[in-house]
Image (cartoon, helix red, strand yellow):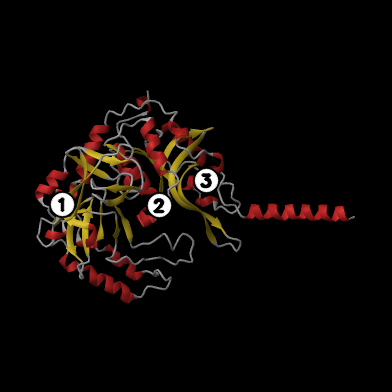
Amino acid sequence: MKLGYYATLALLSLFISACSNTAKITEIADLETLPQEPEIYTQALPVYDFSTQQKLDDEFNKIFFSPWDITQMSYDLAQASWGSYYLKKETYGENHKLRKKEWYEEQIKRSNFELYDTQRRYAISTHNSNLRVFPTQSVIFYNPDSPGEGFPFDYNQNSHIKINTPLFVSHYSLDKAWVYVEANSLFGWLPVKDIAFVNKAQRETFKSGTYFVATEDEFALFDQSENFIEYIKLGTIFPVINGALATIKKNQAVISLPGNEAEFVFSHINKQQVAQKPLAFNNANLNKISTALIGEDYGWGGVLANRDCSAFTKDFFTPFGIYLKRNSSKQLEQGQYIELKDLSNEAKKQGILDNAIPFMTLIYLRGHIMLYIGEQAGEPLVFHNIWGLRTLKDDGSIGRFIIGRAVITTLEPGKELPNLVQASSILNKIQGMVILDRKVDKDALL
């Protein structure tokens, strides 16, 4: 009698435990069944005859240094001051309280756009830094209680700027703590402490013609006296001057002298962390870059120096000398675009399998972009940094299943989730794909 009681209790406990585990799914099936080691996908690639790579790298360098070749801002005042748009929106601050109209009026005043495009000076970023919509580190959230809002979705974050980024300076904020700058395909506010002005001779020296690029992520860089400079992000570009990596820092002794506010700092070349740009587009290098990026936490707009989907694709291709703009929709301009949005889901998959080139094709849906890396058992596979999947809560309201990092998945991640909103699935929403090298086709894979 006692044995039957305890057996029944044990079975009941197992049943409750099973139900509890089912209800608390913490990982999508793709991440359990698909290896998250990039070598599995890169080792099978054939040799890629990439004859246009040097030409693309030359174009990359031209765009990267373009802020040092202009004489006035490339964006008009209306484009530059677009942040006033938020004045009409319901937004929240870091305390999750509503932003008042007066807060925006103060930010607009501090932005000092009456002096837009009057400084017209050349500069460089001396640290990794956040490019902001308004000259403040304070955040702009939509309702933090809504799914997909609140942290990390700070709409005051324009992007993340790496050390050694050439800049063109428009003007100072009213308190002179910030400068409004243009970088390659980006514009916004940077703290004055994170930039240095450079004169013509310094700019010409920095454009050495030989560039190394970071192939590891988040490593500490030291000068030749072992003084810390910065934590370096993959995709950071260094000129090589006299056999050393060059960065620039403010020279505090002459900071008040216009055009002579910076000095060069040199670092030893560690070929485990950097390599000459462009890297050969081969299995070993694709694996190295992929391995450095897999599993990185998601960061909207570069929040906390992490990457979102388009920063991930942009930085992935930087070492190979392929320039992508920062916005996902703008990245479609870099190659041959193939529209898929009007096809059935099965036809979308087949179109990708028939036309996409592994590690050279981006797959796009509104607000998200992914790198195609091949197929497994007839399923296209993608490498992407993704926040989450749209789900339904028990009360019928919209929720999110958070992935929150760079992962390898099918085009239907989370399809096994009982509460996934199928109409909002990645496959359903795919718009098209872009083959990045315009002149390449699948016959180029030898």
Residues at badges 1 and 2 in contact (C-beta under 8 Å)? no
Picture disc at residue 413:
3
Q: Nearer the viewer, residue 294 or 77?
A: 294
Q: Residue furthest top?
A: 446
Which residue is depicted at the point 54% across and 55% down?
A: 391
Residue corresponding to mark 2: 367
Give left or right: position of 365 versus 239: right
- Cα separation, mark 2 vs mark 3, equals 16 Å
Decide: few, some or many residues near mark 2? Use Cα within 10 Å; few <14, some 14-19, many ≥20: few
SS of the residue under disc 1: strand
Could you say which quadrant of the image residue 138 lies in? Answer: bottom left
Given contact means CB atoms under 8 Å apart, are the residues at marks 1 and 3 in contact?
A: no
Q: Is residue 356 left or right of residue 103?
A: right
Decide: is 61 above or below 77: above
**Residue 262, image x, y percentages:** 15, 54
Disc 1 to disc 2, how far (Cα)? 40 Å
Q: Is residue 256 visible?
A: yes
Q: Residue furthest right?
A: 1
Mark toward the start of the polypeptide (1 vs 3): 1
Q: Which mark is residue 356?
A: none
Say whether residue 127 is left or right of residue 140: left
Identified by mark 2, the residue type is Gly
Separation of marks 1 and 3 at Cα, in angstroms:
49 Å
What element does badge 3 sit on? loop
Residue 343, horizontal then vertical, whole percent: 47, 41
Which residue is the site of mark 1?
A: 263
